[in-house]
Image (cartoon, rainbow, N blue to C red):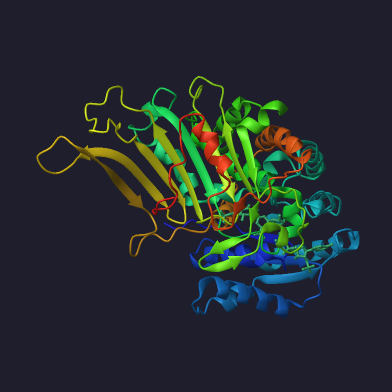
Amino acid sequence: MTYSAPKTIVVIFGATGDLANRKLYPSIYNLYRKGNLTENFAVIGVARRSLDVQEFRQNVRNSVSDSIKESRNDIEEFSNHFYYHPFNVNDSASYKELKLLADQLDSTYNTEGNRIFYLAMAPEFFGTIAENLKSEGLTSTNGYSRLVIEKPFGHNLPSAQQLNEQIRHAFTEDQIYRIDHYLGKEMVQNIEVIRFANAIFEPLWNNRYISNIQITSSEVLGVEDRGGYYEKSGALRDMVQNHMLQMVALLAMEPPIKLNTDEIRSEKIKVLRALRPLEESEVHTNFIRGQYGSGTMNGQQIPGYREEQNVDPKSNTETFVAGKLMIDNFRWAGVPFYIRTGKRMKKKSTKIIVQFKDIPMDLYFNKDRERQNPNLLIINIQPDEGITLHLNAKRPGQNTKTTPIKLDYCVNCIEDGINTPEAYEKLIFDCMMGDATNFTHWDEVALSWSFVDTISKVWENEIATEYPNYPAGSLGPEASDSLLKKDGFHWWPITDSKE
Ligand SMILES: NC(=O)C1=CN([C@@H]2O[C@H](COP(=O)(O)OP(=O)(O)OC[C@H]3O[C@@H](n4cnc5c(N)ncnc54)[C@H](OP(=O)(O)O)[C@@H]3O)[C@@H](O)[C@H]2O)C=CC1
Ligand SMILES: O=C1O[C@H](COP(=O)(O)O)[C@@H](O)[C@H](O)[C@H]1O
């Protein structure tokens, strides 16, 4: 059964930008192609440069064609739903003209006053746009008005609070959809199902049976052309404050009493509240940072971070973070959650590895007195999507030896496997349907910033003389291994080859 989203107008601010072209248009097209959008929708692209509607529609067609790499004859008719409004953020006359266009399209497409305002622009504009939308009457319609807001949501807790206050003048909390695109990923959404739809995991999902949880999100790409943004952000704000802590919250939360937005958010918020805050003096023992230097990847020489475009040649910005988090509640007391994320690493991979405790007594010691491999549950978020369970089984033959085995389920690597939708496609659809479950509530944002702020404060006050401390194409600095070693653990491989 195909669900259709309600009739709506989507206004995309930043319509000529990278995000709109690479992610938003292809995602909206996929919804259209699959029949999730009725003909009653229109998109108004808003950006600074002057384009006429035909040029804009051509851009949209190009971006869709690039993403699907096949020729389809519905792209033209899809692009006919797109309109363009050249605009300047600070000019109130721009908003008045935008309102006229939106009102006119409301009647043309019979969209019943439903509007989604998608802010795909630099964050410094978010507050001004939200306020103008309200003051110029774009939000007062007889339908719904929703604000989708991209990351970063602030730079630290005070700036996030200030931004939140600004947008809350114009939109209520339930109208605000703060995007964290990891929450739209198939296997991130699967965390809840794996945990709460399987009787075998939930009884073991606690400090009695789990020794540690490891979450890695490694990237092969460097900062590309985002040096200007990344210099002020670094991996801690870019990945840890949002995506990594969201995955921790989903892994650690209690079962919600219902699968609705409020109940799930409320359980996630409790986890973030239970995150043990770090004292400044504890930052170095629990978090380590890195910056990539030059290296070889796939036989190609790659420049170091400090040689990238718009990056200070003496940059103190981290491109890698590894950390240990503790959650102070009954379920998780004593279980470390290790996270690591970095750019220019060996492999693009996001994986969650749940390591179970050793069996109480090992009957199958080998001659070297090595213990059995611990059981691991691996949730493969990307690029492979699926789960793997590591068990021990009898080695075939007349012996009492054991051998490690893997039970594998891969969603997207089987031939003709399920082609899972792109995260943005799911999130845009959710927003159209009014489902905010996979968007972050303000309390989650605030709690995440308050955890991360202590770490950034310490790091910003110290020059990282050790930078660069990992070569492009590696698995990050050695200190990341030491972080686990001192607790008697090690990072489980994220690649099949020996790491
Ligand atoms: N790109 C990505 O993969 C991701 C981006 N994001 C976030 O999405 C947002 C957009 O990023 P991205 O698309 O990369 O940014 P880009 O720099 O590629 O695009 C910026 C857009 O904003 C418009 N713009 C800039 N200044 C003004 C102004 N004064 N008045 C009107 N329009 C203006 C530009 O219009 P014009 O071109 O006409 O100047 C352009 O359409 C940011 O918040 C970013 O952090 C989040 C996750 C991933
Ligand atoms: O939000 C961001 O995420 C991407 C990584 O996303 P993924 O879906 O490719 O894992 C990261 O490259 C970017 O720096 C960050 O802003």
x, y percent for residue 351: 47, 46
Tell me: 286 left or right of 255: right
* Number of marks present in the image shown: 0
Residue at left offset 55%, top offset 59%: 220
Tell me: 450 left or right of 198: right
x, y percent for residue 317: 72, 49
Depicted 308 relative to depicted 189: above or below: below
Depicted 16 relative to depicted 367: above or below: below
Between 468 and 131, the one lying in front of the other is: 468
Depicted 323 relative to depicted 300: above or below: above
Give residue 371's quadrant in the image.
Answer: top left
Tell me: 71 left or right of 316: left
Between 124 and 285, the one lying in front of the other is: 285
Residue 465: in sight, yes or no?
yes
Between 34 and 455, the one lying in front of the other is: 455
Which quarter of the rendered picture does the N terminus lie within?
A: bottom left
x, y percent for residue 60: 64, 73
**Where does ligand 1 appear, by image quarter?**
bottom right
Furthest-left residue in this view: 398
Residue at left offset 54%, top offset 36%: 482
x, y percent for residue 278: 67, 27
Give residue 202's quadrant in the image.
Answer: top left
Residue at left offset 39%, top offset 58%: 412
Residue at left offset 62%, top offset 66%: 22
